[in-house]
Amino acid sequence: MEQKRISQWIGKQSILFEEARRPYVLSSAAVGGKKEGEGPLGVYLDEVVEDPFCGGKTWEEAESRLQEKAVRLAIHKSKLKKEQIRYLFGGDLLGQLIATSFGISIFQIPLFGIYGACSTMGEALLLGAMTVAGGYGDYVISMTSSHTASAEKQFRFPMEYGNQRPLCASWTVTGSGAVVLSYKKPEKEEPLIRINGGTPGKIVDFGLKDSMNMGACMAPAAADTIYRNLRDLDVPADYYDQIITGDLGQVGRKILLELLSEKGYEIRDRHMDCGIAVYDSLTQDTHSGGSGCGCSAITLNGYIMHKMKKGDWKRILFVPTGALLSPISFNEGNSVPGIAHGVILEAETSLS
Amino acid sequence: MEQKRISQWIGKQSILFEEARRPYVLSSAAVGGKKEGEGPLGVYLDEVVEDPFCGGKTWEEAESRLQEKAVRLAIHKSKLKKEQIRYLFGGDLLGQLIATSFGISIFQIPLFGIYGACSTMGEALLLGAMTVAGGYGDYVISMTSSHTASAEKQFRFPMEYGNQRPLCASWTVTGSGAVVLSYKKPEKEEPLIRINGGTPGKIVDFGLKDSMNMGACMAPAAADTIYRNLRDLDVPADYYDQIITGDLGQVGRKILLELLSEKGYEIRDRHMDCGIAVYDSLTQDTHSGGSGCGCSAITLNGYIMHKMKKGDWKRILFVPTGALLSPISFNEGNSVPGIAHGVILEAETSLS
């Protein structure tokens, strides 16, 4: 392992930053909606917005305002001025990323708009880290969001229709998460969290066509990225204290564990899915679990960061998962391919 | 200048790669539709696809097939195997990037999905170059596309309605462009084309709301990025042999020249707009000019690369321009903000 670390990229598709260049998480923020606040991880959120419109007039504006809150809070916690943030990597689920276009323009930070469906937090984090480690800026911010109502309107049926949802369907998280990455070592309490590298994902298409069962569509992509990461780094699954997928839900998790088991990796004892963790499915009526870009984003920047800072998890593989569909591709009878981007985060103390 | 080059980032928002790390354009491909083939730059295209459906069944599938053709051709011309391409940076105009999800999955190259509206070729090229120069891979591919019919269906009215278009409206280019970037110096005839750096753009919103006049919406963003680039590099406009915007059209060009003139930069004698160049507006009924991600993509990979290889232009600033709107944001009465990403390309000979 140590030898390989010197290089910035290894194996077929993974990146490991040079030891000294690994970006630091300078600050992070997680903003959720009412339902997320009431969920098992609600206590770890920085802010809970009770009003579903977030003070806005439309669902899209509500989502934009969540982004604005998360970015503003992350910058505030970083003690930087917004002018010091060189680039912003962000996106959302809506067509043409309009939540982002209208959510972050107020900050006037040069924007790289990205789209990875619900894997966007992983893509944003990885590109942000590559930018910082590559020497293109001292500080960048990586951000994403989703909103139940704007997503249902975009992809399925407007909430106002009150249509029934099958048990394998997930509930789009209302929330936004933002991370400020820094090249310079932060002057703050240890442990510090750093990005070691990651594994950008390929599109994996098993031919599934059910937009109400996205966990099953995404599980093969998650399995592919996790497998590739472990193979590229040449490490066993217990190299990570936790392997965390985005929003597979109960159905997708089962498929993931089986697929990886077939390939010789048992991750059951260290696998967590943000979609399963974010709600209490028995009392919150969320069926298969949470989903959306916001699902992994608020779980990372709330609960996961907390666990790492507390020392419970030293090194994790964070693998947000995305289902690549649009209302048009779905109505035209296309399959729902998946993609998953893996990011390695490590908590570091002077002693470690 | 030379001193600054040593650093990888300069000024407020620009990047200049270290001299030795500047990525090479290993190959590029431009595939256009029938109308593009008949246009003034048609002769520079690698392939013209006469069938508007490109052999597919839907407009979206047609666009995906254009991407597949462009990527396949660029890889073929690079003499690499597709397995050697480490990452793909790409996107398109359609909601949730479905042209890309279905267009490039066949290549099984890890994907960074990006969205910059019609500025996507610039964003893809810049991120690809940052990845190669940063040492994250020897070869990457940057790609985008658009299609008249899929774009009209997405943003305005399906072509089949036959609605009238105002004279300030543009015509979405049917086409796809792809570039293979290499860290290693290619063994081929000079001049070699390299990416020196670039200037990622900010969202610029002048409050315009007319989705039929996108040139006016995007011109302020183009002006902002060009101004920032010239200021960051501390160079006059004639540092570039040509400053090339994406799809401002006649209306947007006029605004761009005025805005830059107000800031003290006269670029009239070296400004070209891909949207104006790609069609003959008198005979092709395209009104204000071409637009769409494909507009700057096929012009770059066809005509512009030709001019640089021929030695007519040594150094250019390529500034694709994007209008950030969606059918939803437009119908909700929002403005159409713009964004423009600048990329510096330079033709290099052993003597230069």
Image (spheres, coloured by chain):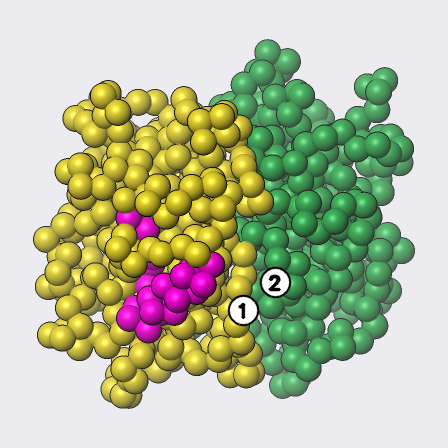
Chain colours: A yellow, B green
Q: Main secondary structure of the magenta part?
A: helix
Query: In the rendered view, would you say A288 is above or below B298?
Result: below
- Identify which residue, A303 or B201, lies in the foreground: A303
- Left or right: A168 with respect to B172? left
What span is in magenta?
A: A242-263
Pointers 1 and 2 in contact (C-beta within 8 Å): yes
Q: Nearer the viewer, residue B9 or B107?
A: B107
Q: Name the foreground residue: A141 vs B136.
A: B136
- Which label sits on residue B105? 2
The residue type indicated by label 1 comes to Asp
Q: Residue at x 61, y 58 (%)?
A: B108
**Residue B286 appears in the figure:** yes
Residue A281 on image: x %, y %? 17, 72
Question: How far is the residue under mark 1 from the one under mark 2?
Answer: 8 Å
The percent coordinates of residue A296 (x first, y second) are: 30, 56
Where does the image place residue A282, in percent across and percent down from the top left?
A: 13, 75
- Relative height, residue B18 to residue B335 (above, below): above
Near mark 1 (Cα within 10 A), the count class, few <14, some 14-19 or many ≥20, is many
Residue designated by label 1? A205
Dot 1 lies on which element? loop
The location of residue B315, given as percent across then percent down, is: 74, 30
The quarter of the picture where the N terminus of chain A appears is top left
Which quadrant would the C terminus of chain A be assigned to in this image?
top left
Was residue A312 drawn as part of the magenta stretch in this picture? Answer: no
- Kind of residue at badge 2: Ser
Q: Is residue B64 above or below residue A126?
A: below
Q: Picture quarter containing residue A307? A: top left
Can residue A180 be seen in the rendering of this structure? no
The residue positioned 29% from the left and 59% from the top of the image is: A268
